[in-house]
Amino acid sequence: MPRAAREKSSTGIYHVMLRGSNHKILFEDNEDYQKYLETIKTFQEKSGYAIYAYCLMSNHIHLLIKEVTEDLGIVFRRLGASYVHWYNRKYSRRGHLFQDRYKSEMVETDSYFLTVLRYIHQNPYKAGMVKNIADYPWSSYGEYVGEPRICDVEFGYNLFSTNRVKAVKLFKEFNLAENQDRCLDYDPGVRLNDTEASNFIRSISGVQSPTEIALLEKGKRNEVIKKCKAKGLSIRQIERLTGISFGVIRTI
């Protein structure tokens, strides 16, 4: 059965989510995250899109993007082909990395634009990966409060105020506010049972038993736990399998 055509946004702005095929990890280390951001920047001029926000998680990506010159389907084929070629060479692998079709939703009002902006920036926080959204290095929040690299921050700021000082203050307050925002989200699908989860933990850490995670160097331990969360393991399941306390896991 042919796929339904994507409904067009009157503003050209979309909230897009891309994920790894069969929940594959997209970013194994910092170099991978940086490479994907560089790829986005490289194709901006050729494809003519504008980026308003992004968040790169280990196995999925959120983008707030405006379609300008090229259709988004072409844009993501370009980005995917370039990044996957580099990634496969680096890790001596072959085949697909991204799921065939990206998910998207139209963003047609200023209020929903701001909702999506905050939702994207709070993604790592709500996943329990950081205590503060400013602590996550692979989202566009840092571009808004620091130096823009690939984002058009002016568009977002102007929705708060044309006065930059006031806009930055209001932006921070809005993005840090507790909320019940519901937007296009990553659904890990069927949860792994304990046997599958244990096998996953062993595969990403090299340990013989999940309980050995607690003995790893803190940085390595935290990376393993972050990947477990991104895979869809609950905090309780990680606690049960590794013996690491709920409180510690929740703050990682």
Image: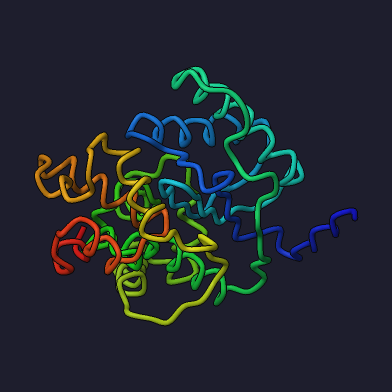
Q: Give the left or right position of residue 117, taking residue 73 as reference.
A: left
Residue 63 percent coordinates (x, y)? 54, 53
Work out whether 132 lies above or below 101: below
- The picture places residue 31, in percent across and down from the top left corner, at 35, 29
Q: Position of residue 243 (x, y in %)?
A: 15, 59
Q: Is residue 14 above or below residue 222?
A: below
Quadrant where the image shows the N terminus: bottom right
Horizontal arrangement in the rendering, residue 77 relative to residue 85 (left or right): right
Query: Could you say which is closer to the camera, residue 163 or residue 109?
Result: 109
Which quadrant of the view contains residue 9? bottom right
Specify whether residue 186 is in view: no
Where residue 38 sits in the image (x, y, percent)?
47, 31
Q: Residue at x 18, y 40 (%)?
A: 220
Name the one closer to the observer, 165 or 125: 125
For the residue pair 245 and 196, the one nearer the viewer reads as 196
225, 161: nearer the viewer:
225
